[in-house]
Image (cartoon, rainbow, N blue to C red):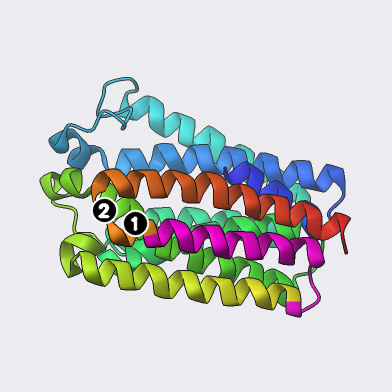
Amino acid sequence: MMVVVTGTTAFGFGATPARTGLAAGAAGLLSLSCFLLDHLFDLPKDRAAGRTSNPFAAGALTPRAGRILVAILLSGAALLALLVGWPSLAAVGGVVLVVFGLGIGILDTPILRAVSLGVIQGLYALLGGLSAGSPGVGLGFTALFLLLAMTGGRVLGDVRDMEDDARAGTLTIPLRYGIRASIVFLFCFEFLAYLAGAAMYAADALGRGWWWCLVAIAGAGTAINVAFAAQPTPRVADIANRLSLGLLGGLYSLGMVLARLLP
């Protein structure tokens, strides 16, 4: 998903095919390395909770092999980003710092964990947009749009994983503040995200193709969130989370492409 988001953001802001490919490649290596790094940090808790989704807890990979893979993948991501430019390399470094902050516990609180997910998404957008040249107001609003949207959307994943998180002792927004507060958190951040999306268009950074897709994102996203709020169970949260990542993520990427094709 991060490859698509980064690549389409690069395309939307006018990057050449070569630079778009470099940015997308860096995102792919970076996301895979951070996936492994996150699981390495979570190994003790995931092993205690019996989570088989963690390849180290399931025994599919040894921690030593994981550390070697992380080093190789991060080196590749850094090299590709450097070929695009120093600002893109800084975006890669920012993602790694956030993952480390979560892993060592500095950002491991219910709210900061949600915001951190949003920051990571925003940094991937910056990685893509920076490949097109100097950053502008429009790219800043794009990063803010993803930051806000993914911060709010974290609630869906937290409700989905409530039972596993409770067993592992992971304090999340629904476990700390309750379901009702989680729903309010979700709607507030999604609304702010839609405002940031409108600002992307108002700043003349993206064409009308983005506006049409933003309207679709707001409509579909609101419908998904209302359905979840009506029945905020782990099963419904799982469906809502999948739809948000798949449908809304797809509409974002389509909007980036149309923004360049339909100025």
154 is within the stretch colored magenta: no
**Left or right: residue 260 compared with residue 166:** right
The N terminus appears in which quarter of the rendering? top right
The C terminus appears in which quarter of the rendering? bottom right
Residue 147 visible somewhere in the drawing: yes
Q: Position of residue 79 (x, y in %)?
A: 68, 43
Q: Report the residue at 60% width, 75% height from top.
A: 196
Q: How crowded is mark 1: few (under 14 residues within 10 Å), some or many (20 or more)?
A: many
Q: Is mark 1 on a helix, strand or loop?
A: helix
**Left or right: residue 222 compared with residue 255:** left
Q: Report the disc number at residue 94.
A: none
Q: Report the disc number at residue 159.
A: 2
The span picked out in magenta is: 202-226
Q: Where is residue 15 in the image (x, y as percent from the top left)?
A: 83, 54
Q: Report the residue at 50% width, 48% height from top.
A: 245
Which is closer to the viewer, label 2 or label 1? 1
Q: Please, what is the three-letter code of the amino acid marked with disc 1?
A: Phe
The quarter holding residue 25 reads top right
- Decide: marks 2, 1 in contact (CB < 8 A)? yes
Residue 9 visible somewhere in the drawing: no
- As drawn, the residue found furthest toward the top would be 60
Label whose residue precedes the other's in the sequence (2 or 1): 2
Report which residue position mark 1 lands on: 228
**Left or right: residue 144 compared with residue 167:** right
Q: Is mark 2 on a helix, strand or loop?
A: helix
223 is within the stretch colored magenta: yes
**Left or right: residue 67 compared with residue 221:** left
Q: State the residue in front, 107 or 161.
A: 161
Q: Where is residue 220 in the image (x, y as percent from the top left)?
A: 54, 57
Tell me if residue 252 comes above or below residue 67 in the rendering: below
